[in-house]
Image: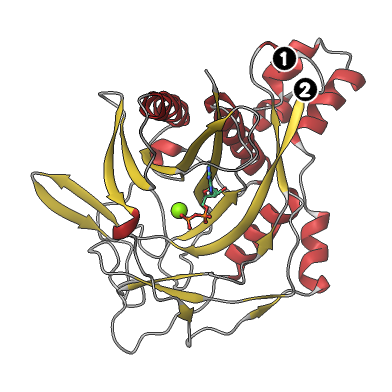
Amino acid sequence: MKYEAVIGLEVHIQLNTRTKMFSRAPYKYGAPPNTLTDPIVMGLPGTLPIMNKDAVMKTLKTGLMFDCQIPEICKWDRKNYFYPDLPKGYQISQNNQPLCLGGFIEIELPGPSRNIMGKHRKIKLTRIHLEEDAGKLIHNGDSLVDYNRAGASLIEIVTEPDLFSADEAFAFLTSLRIHMLYAGISDCDMEKGQMRCDANISLRPIGSSTLGTKVELKNLNSISGVRNGIEYEIKRQAKHLDEGNKIIQETRKWNADEGFSSSMRTKEMAHDYRYFPDPDLMPVKITSNILDPIKQDLPERPFDKQIRFFSQYDLPFTITSVLYPDFKLCNFF
Ligand code: ADP
Ligand code: MG
């Protein structure tokens, strides 16, 4: 292969807050459809959002765990688009003043080095912001919509284009999930939609330092689906380039059952979200009074725990590799 793959991930994670991001409606996976809504979730006229403090605290905890900078002020923006899963016609999100900037997530390098101590790499993050989830559409001949998920608290973690293989993306999501379990913020179960991932993939000639044109891959429904989808996409782009073609910037859909990607939309069809600050919500000022207690409450880092188990209890390193991903098993041990 004469190309190097470059990958950036956009990962959505539902926070395990008791109620939704801007209303008192509860959220729980698996409840009967359309039972967890209220007038705020439905965007009925005259309703006003109220910010969920626990969601902000849990986002800050995530950011501190990953060494992000926490700007003093964050604000809420409306991201406008029309789709049946979005009853208000806009999503409350954070555009240019998110809660967390920068930071990194440490991963175990894939391959045989997995069982060698210290073979890790830090993947750079761009940002982490907080927003509300959309409802869920179900197409089974008829098209149905379930608004239970609408308005649930959701963070988006965006990485820099700092991953270089499908296996690294797999290791990244695995590490991210383990950290979130340690922090008690989300189970990150992809089958329940608690963690969802879009992958941006481009190729460049080996040795080049400029980025190639990226393709965004959606509908990756499991951590191994992410790996398979990226692997396929790298091969598809390499073949396309070898045949003398150019990659066009587009969004593609991963079809997991058949194992191929297909085009969804090109750049020309990109959305214009007409972002503007939400007039119903105040910006939030993050003071040390808010941050200090969260810093006290950060979990031991998973890889630190692994090293500690290795040195303190004299366990074989391979055993610590099995233990550390399972927070409950570690506590039991
Ligand atoms: P968009 O505006 O299309 O969402 P962004 O610049 O915000 O694009 O980046 C979204 C994601 O795509 C990020 O994770 C980023 O790291 C990744 N990305 C951007 N450019 C490339 C590229 N050329 N190759 C691979 N990933 C990229
Ligand atoms: Mg994108």
Which element is circle 1 on? helix
Residue 216, how many percent across, how many down?
A: 41, 44
Q: Mark 2 points at which residue?
A: 119
For the residue pair 184 and 317, the one nearer the viewer reads as 317
Residue 82 falls left or right of residue 190: left
The vertical placement of 237 against 247, above or below, is: above
Q: Which amino acid does label 1 sit on?
A: Ser
**Crowd band around label 2 with a 10 angstrom C-alpha radius: few (<14), some (14–19), many (20+):** few
Q: Mark 1 points at which residue?
A: 113
Residue 175 falls left or right of residue 276: right
**Crowd band around label 1 with a 10 angstrom C-alpha radius: few (<14), some (14–19), many (20+):** few
Asked if the beta carbon under badge 2 is closer than 8 A to the nearest atom of ligand 1, the reply is no
Residue 305, how many percent across, how many down?
A: 80, 30
For the residue pair 302 and 214, the one nearer the viewer reads as 214
Q: Are marks 2 and 1 in contact (CB under 8 Å)?
A: yes
Q: What residue type is labelled 2?
A: Lys
